[in-house]
Every structure is written in structure tokens, then in C-alpha cells.
Amino acid sequence: MQTPGEIEIKFPVSELADLSATLQEFDARNLAPRHLERNWRFDTPDGELTHSGRVLRVRQAQRATLTYKERAEQRLTRREIEIDISSSDRATQLLEALGYHTILIYEKYRQVFQLDDVQIMLDALPFGFFVEVEGPDEPTIRDTAERLGFEWEAGVDLSYMEIFERLKDAAGLDLPNLTFSDFEDYNLDTMALLGLRDALTKAGNTD
């Protein structure tokens, strides 16, 4: 049986304020208002999951979920298994009882829109703003992104944790977690440090 997956790309942007209005102009549905997500990432004591590019995560947002991810062969694609859980605390206790331990806590504020077959997530992280676009295939995602005014070549095929690790190396940070309280004493230019650019360079095409 084929494992379900997700096809997505992230676009770095300098601000999110106008994007919600732009999406409403395209009659996108607001699936979830802006809310805080708190995540706990788990691994074995020897880092087996991280070394093999796999992710085991508990998330507390508007609902609690337990998620497993791994990279697929296709570009922009990750295999994903996600289930709803009744309690993030109980799920954490279960994973710890099985020998896993928390290696990272990370947070973001997220607002979710649906435009045809594509979901658009407006994400505010402690180190900057990104728009994540997820859909059934790469051509559909690209068409939607370019309609909204995003430069496709400015997108990044990295997880937020991979971006975080690269940022720590570039800025010489020694931070165990990616939370807003951890970053409150820093004012970093993430795009400049990582060689990224604002992907929202032109107005969306409503034709």
C-alpha cells in the first residue's frame, strides 16, 4: 500500500499582512484563522530518525496530532502519516515510554487558506515569514503560486527545521529550541544570512 504524502514548497516573504486580503480577492476559503502551533520533535537516543531524514512529531494547535514523515524520491514530496490524538501530553508520555525523547520544541503562528485544490499556509516563525503552498502535484502548485504573485525560483524545498539548522550555523547561534521566547533577544536578517530573497515580487494575476 502506498504511503500518503504531501507535495509542498515554501516561499520566504518579508511580510504577511497583505496576503490574507490577496487570497480573499481570489475567493480563497479561510480554513483556519491565525493560531499558534507548538511542536515536539522526537528521536531515538542515537539520532536514528534524524540521520535517516525521518520525522516523528507531536503537534498541539487547533487539534492535537501525531505525525511521521520521510522524504520521497520525487522533488517537493514527503511521505506522511498523521493521526488525530486526544492529548499531546499523553502522546508525549507514550513516545517517551517507547524510548524516544524530545530533541526539539518549535513554534509558529499559522493561518490556512484553500484555493481550489491547493492549501496556502501563512506562517510566522521566530526567524521570519514564509508561505507554504501544498497541493496534489507540482504543476498545480506552481500555477497557483504564480497566480498569487510568487516567484517560483525563490521557493525553497526545505523543512523549517532544516532552515533553522542552517540559520544557526550561519549566525553562530546556540539555541536548543525554535520558540518565540528563544528568539526574543535576536533580530536576525534570515534571508540575507541564508541567501534567500522575498518571493512575493509582483502583484497576483487575477485574469
Image (cartoon, helix red, strand yellow):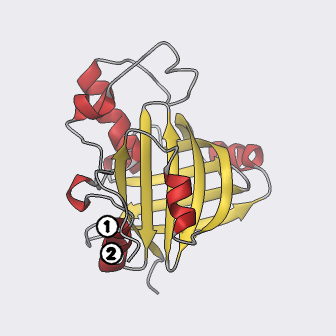
Occupied quadrant, residue 39: top right
Q: Can you say whether 188 is above or below 163 in the image?
A: above
Please rate how many residues cluster around mark 2, counting C-alpha atoms within 10 Å: few if below 14, some from 14 to 19, many from 20: few
> Where is residue 166 shown, x and y percent of the image?
28, 34
Query: Residue most toward the right?
Result: 86
Residue at 28% in and 17% down? 172
Label 2 vs label 1: CA separation? 5 Å
Q: Residue at x 33, y 75 (%)?
A: 143
Q: Nearer the viewer, residue 147 or 164?
A: 147
Residue matched to label 1: 146
Give percent across and percent down for residue 118.
48, 73
Q: Quadrant of residue 192?
A: top left
Mark 1 neighbour density, 10 Å: few (under 14) some (14–19) many (20 or more): some
Does 7 sit left or right of 74 as displayed? right
Residue 83 in the image, given as x and y percentages of width and height: 65, 66
The reply, left or right, for residue 141 in relation to residue 110 is left
Can residue 100 be seen here? The reply is no
Q: Is residue 26 visible?
A: yes
Q: Any mark on residue 109, and which?
A: none
**Is the C-beta separation of discs 2 and 1 under 8 Å?**
yes
User: Amino acid under label 2?
Assistant: Asp
Residue with the mark numbered 2: 143
- Looking at the image, which residue is at 64% across and 64% down? 30
Q: Nearer the viewer, residue 100 or 25?
A: 25
- Furthest-front residue in this view: 207
